[in-house]
Image: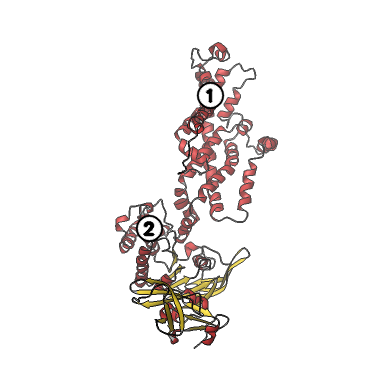
Amino acid sequence: MPIVANASRFSKFGRPTLAWIVGILFFFPIFWMVLTSFKTDADAVKPEHLIFFKPTFDNYLNMTENYDYWRFAKNSVITAVMATVFTLVVGIPCAYAMAFNPSRATKDVLMWMLSTKMLPAAAVLYPMTFITKTAGLFDTHFLIILVLSLINMPIVIWMLFTYFKEIPKDIIEAGQMDGANTWGEITEILVPLAWGGIASTALLCFIFCWNEAYWTVRLTTTDAATLSKLIEGNRAPEGLFFGRLSAVSAAAVGPIVVLGWFCQKQLVQGLTFGAVK
Amino acid sequence: MGRIVLNNVTKSFGDVEVIPPLDLTIEDGEFTVFVGPSGCGKSTLLRMIAGLEDLTSGSIEIDGAVATNVPPAQRGLAMVFQSYALYPHMSVRKNIGFPLRMAKMGQAEIKQRVEIAAKSLNLMDYLDRKPADLSGGQRQRVAIGRAIVREPAAFLFDEPLSNLDAALRVGMRLEIGELHERLKTTMIYVTHDQVEAMTMANKIVVLRAGVIEQVGSPLELYHKPQNVFVAGFIGSPKMNIFSGSEAAKLGASTVGIRPEHLDVSMSGGRWKGRVGVAEHLGSDTFIHVSDTSLADTVTVRITGDIAVKHGDTIYLIPQSDQLHKFDPQGMRVAQ
């Protein structure tokens, strides 16, 4: 008798149910935030207005009028875009070298890069603040771009390295034989071939930069302050301004949620490190 | 012009020496084949000439100029890879034109040269296709096209036919042979297939464990193998090699005789044996004879057809001028 895989009841009903539960669990805070952003600060804390309330746009109108939302948004765009570009410009040649001309130290270097992500950010808070203030870089775009780049560099190089590893070495060597110099190999062969992987990496890097809060909050005041700082600024210990806070948060995560929605495929590919083809 | 000289080159990977000191000269215009069993260092040697592997010591000259530390892009050599290594994101036209574009040649001239190459390789109808839409043979031709457009000092082929099926391989073998006749450019060709080596080469370099066992023309290797290894490696079916008392009777430590140099008789002859398997190919018959005093199995090649079957008693008669004799070290004994 042939052996046929028997689809268990779990995989038929249990798995989709579980997926829905997890999905709702993740989505709920966003839903709640958006809902609350249309409530007045007073309604936001009243249990009787949990679901049914009179929607208001005041929180959003207030935000653009009183808090200069667009300035923060502009800073977020500038720093996230520039940091992503810079990270790729440095990361691509770096990953290329490690993928195609590895030395005995390559594995150790990769591990060392990853290990920097294990360091708690708070551990370097004091030296970072001290150095940036002394160097006169505090609250500048340059600093935020640099910090965001350095934070994301290890993960970007790891991802690119994994993608580049999938390109047959023969093709790169054919490029060398055909007279391409290193620049030619990267721009004519490597980048076009790894384009999907580079795009997913860039997208993920951009999202990480956009969402970064620890350093952007602590190393800026006004000039280079990003949307993270705007949210932080609207946090009140008394918890009286939930409506306002929710609107600011929704406006801060909105662009990235929309971007993520349109780029789902690349993101999944990026997050699985090219394991899924 | 492409005269290539290897002086005392060696290659080690870590502590493992894959190429002990080796000297070799490849004359301009020669079709040289590196042949040997897998792992003998033939591909490594080719990649060292290409510049894709560094030398551990020694030097390489191309056209009289020392090229040891010249990067592959500047050696003026073209290479055809076993995997074809086409650029999957480029059309056939772009693939073939790539080396010219890297050499900063003008658009019009690139177009013209690509088309001349494509025409000579029957690729005109496929110029706008991507490599993924081509058959194995067409991909191989694109790889060759990419190599010929730039008029290199020498072509390097790294087992270019091993991914093709048998029929296509014979066709491509002829095409590469014709290409060499037409271009008269130096070609270095790596293969583990001694038939390819015999049919294409002007000069065969037989390698084993990074050491050159013999260099010579195909027929020199066939008629005068310098040692037992070359004797067994060159020729198909393999030479029958035996030692012991029967070899001693012929005055050598080891004796070899090719299957085609054995005659058979059903009534009497020098060596008696029993027919194991007889392969009837029509033009030839290969008889595998067992229970002889020579070796476990002796292969005989008879031109035409012969009526023998499993279990028949058969006598083998060597053509005495075709015996290859070797001393205890396995080296050829002059006759």
Q: Secondary structure at mark 1?
A: helix
The colour mode here is secondary structure
Above or below, A157 against B271 in this view is above
Helix or strand or loop: what does disc 2 sit on? helix
Q: Could you say where residue B60 lies in the image, as x and y percent from the top left?
A: 52, 71
Residue A252 falls left or right of residue B317: right
Observer-nearest of B24 and B290: B290
Q: Which residue is mark 2?
A: B136
Mark 2: which amino acid? Gly
The front one of B38 and B11 is: B38
Q: Nearer the viewer, residue A15 or B5?
A: A15
Residue drawn at x 53%, y 51% is A96
Residue at 44% x, 57% y is: B85
Task: For residue A12, say whether it is visible.
Answer: yes
Q: Are marks 2 and 1 on the same chain?
A: no
Q: Chain of mark 2?
A: B
Residue wearing tag 1:
A28
The residue lying toward the viewer, choosing from A156 and B309, is B309
Amino acid type assigned to the residue bearing label 1 in the image: Phe
In the image, residue A62 sits, relative to residue A211, either above or below, namely above
CA distance separating discs 2 and 1: 54 Å
Residue A38, percent across and down? 50, 17
